Image (cartoon, grey):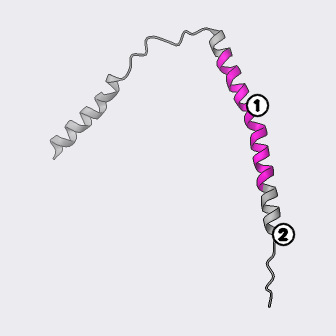
Amino acid sequence: MKAIIATLSLILFAVPAFAVDTTQTYNSGILVLLFVGFCALLIVAQLVPAVLTLFGMTKEAVKKSGRKTVSAKN
């Protein structure tokens, strides 16, 4: 049993050795980063009003559903 545990532990410790080579670094230019940042800005700018509208619609739906009462007719 100790041999199995020792073998598994050696294999698990050796796994990071098979990781991707990190000698190459990110070398895209600043223009690529600016473009990605601009795209992210567009998405966030559209997301904020959408979330605010969703909260407003939810609040109105809760208000309207709270007003309705059912009365029993004999």
Per the image, the residue denoted by label 2 is 67
Q: Nearer the viewer, mark 2 or mark 1?
A: 2
User: Label 1's element?
Assistant: helix
In this picture, residue 36 sits left or right of residue 74:
left
Per the image, the residue denoted by label 1 is 45
Q: Furthest-bottom residue in view?
A: 74
Q: Is residue 13 above or below residue 1?
A: above
> How dense is the environment of label 2, judged by Cα within 10 Å: few (below 14), some, or many (20 and up)?
few
Name the amino acid, label 1. Answer: Ala
Question: Which quadrant holds residue 53?
Answer: top right
Q: Are marks 2 and 1 in contact (CB under 8 Å)?
A: no
Q: Is residue 14 above or below residue 26?
A: below
Question: Which quadrant holds residue 12?
Answer: top left
User: Label 2's element?
Assistant: helix
Q: Position of residue 56 (x, y in %)?
A: 81, 50
Which residue occupies 75% across, 33% down?
Answer: 46
Q: Quadrant of the C terminus?
A: bottom right
Magenta residues span: 35-58
Verify whether residue 53 appears in magenta. Answer: yes
